[in-house]
Amino acid sequence: MSRLLSTPRPLRVATDDYGKPVALLWRGRRDPVTVGNHWRLEGDWWRQRIAREYYRLLTKSGIVCTVYRDGGDGGWYLEKMLD
């Protein structure tokens, strides 16, 4: 079952030199990740320009989640968790 968050939550993400996630910094620790999928979304969505880079991640602790980097503010957000 997956849980789509009603409002994406800000998230700290460690990246490599190319901007690819290597770890999530949450729950007071660093949780290394493996990227399972990567895609981009760009366009006008109901008059609000969006540009996001999405990643489906598997954490070392066994959590599968979808995160994205917002092209507007550069921040990382947690959008979905799968269990």
Image (cartoon, rainbow, N blue to C red):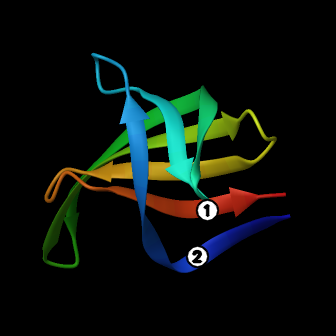
Residue 12 image offset from top left, x and y in percent: 40, 52
Distance between mark 2 and mark 1 Cα atoms: 6 Å
Which is nearer the eye, 16 or 7?
Answer: 16
Determine whether label 2 and label 1 are within 8 Å by CB. yes
Residue found at x 30% / y 27% = 19
41 lies left or right of 60:
left
78 or 41: nearer the eye? 78
Quadrant in which residue 5 is drawn: bottom right
In this orientation, which residue lies closer to the viewer: 5 or 47?
A: 5
Q: Position of residue 21 (x, y in %)?
A: 45, 31
Amino acid type of the residue that numbered disc 2 sits on in the rendered structure = Leu
Amino acid at the residue labelled 1: Lys
Question: The residue tagged with tag 2: helix, strand or loop?
Answer: strand
Expressed as whole percent of the image width and height from the top left, the position of residue 45 reads 24, 70
At a point 32% along the width and 48% down the height, the residue shown is 69
Which type of secondary structure does the marked residue at label 1 adopt?
Answer: strand
* Residue where numbered disc 2 is placed: 5
Quadrant where the N terminus sits is bottom right
Residue 34: % across, % down: 63, 26
Q: Residue at x 74, y 33 (%)?
A: 60
Q: How many marks?
A: 2
Q: Is residue 51 left or right of residue 82?
A: left
The quadrant in which residue 47 appears is: bottom left
Residue 80 tag number: 1
Q: Residues within 10 Å of mark 2 (few under 14, many from 20)?
A: few
> On screen, 47 above or below 15?
below
Query: 20 or 56: nearer the eye?
Result: 20
Q: Residue furthest bottom?
A: 6
Quadrant of the rendering where the C terminus is positioned: bottom right
Q: Does residue 4 lie above or below 74 as drawn?
A: below
Q: Residue at x 28, y 16 (%)?
A: 17
In the image, residue 70 sits, relative to residue 3, either above or below, namely above
